């Protein structure tokens, strides 16, 4: 599995969030403050889950509904599914599950 490119994840999450609210969204903008609603949040979480094949929870989304936080959560989830590098110990990673 190739290493996770946090920049690419961020850009794609930003695009998905912008599509959900119908406007460009800054990294720190709260999804709900820029016009997002609960129904579209559910669809957005599903789109992120399918795009990245990660178990992002709706709870995580509601707790930190910004592009910055969501992309960080996706990166953590992706990294937690990567096998450890040779010589690395296999530790527990907090992925906000």
Image (spheres, helix red, strand yellow):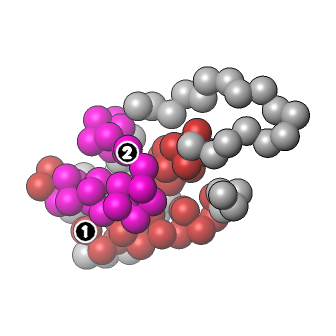
Q: Let me know if residue 65 is in the magenta part.
A: no
Q: Residue at x 29, y 35 (%)?
A: 59
Residue 82, percent across and down? 63, 45
Q: Say left or right for 38 vs 88.
A: left
Residue found at the very far left of the displayed protein? 39
The correct choice, above or below, for 76 with respect to 16 in the image is above
Quadrant assignment for the C terminus: top left
Residue 88, percent across and down? 82, 32
Front-most of residues 29 and 66: 66
Q: Start and end of the magenta stretch?
A: 40-63
Tell me which label, 2 or 1, sits earlier in the chain. 1
Q: Residue at x 45, y 59 (%)?
A: 52
Helix, strand or loop for disc 1: helix
Residue 46, percent across and down? 27, 56
Kindly report which numbered mark, 2 or 1, lies closer to the viewer in this rendering: 2
Q: Residue at x 55, y 49 (%)?
A: 78
Prevalent SS, magenta region: helix
Q: In this figure, which residue is indicated by the disc labeled 2?
A: 56
- Using a 10 Å C-alpha cutoff, classify the residue at mark 2 as few (fewer than 14 neighbours), some (14 to 19) or many (20 or more): many
Q: How many marks?
A: 2
Front-most of residues 51 and 8: 51
Helix, strand or loop for disc 2: loop
Q: Are marks 2 and 1 in contact (CB under 8 Å)?
A: no
The correct choice, above or below, for 17 with respect to 49 in the image is below
Q: Say left or right for 31 vs 80.
A: left
- Using a 10 Å C-alpha cutoff, classify the residue at mark 1 as few (fewer than 14 neighbours), some (14 to 19) or many (20 or more): some
Q: In this figure, which residue is indicated by the disc labeled 1?
A: 21
Q: Let me know if residue 44 is in the magenta part.
A: yes
* Residue 67 seen from this side: no
Residue 37, percent across and down? 16, 55
Which quadrant of the structure image shows residue 35? bottom left
Which quadrant of the structure image shows residue 39? bottom left
């Amino acid at each position: 599995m190739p290493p996770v490119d946090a920049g690419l994840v961020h850009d794609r999450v930003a695009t998905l969030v912008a599509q959900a609210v119908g406007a460009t969204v800054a990294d720190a903008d709260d999804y709900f403050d820029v016009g997002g609603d609960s129904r579209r949040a559910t669809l957005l979480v599903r789109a992120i889950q399918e795009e990245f094949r990660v178990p992002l929870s709706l709870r995580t989304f509601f707790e930190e509904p910004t592009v910055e936080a969501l992309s960080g959560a996706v990166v953590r989830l992706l990294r937690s599914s990567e096998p450890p590098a040779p010589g690395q110990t296999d530790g527990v990673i907090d992925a906000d599950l």
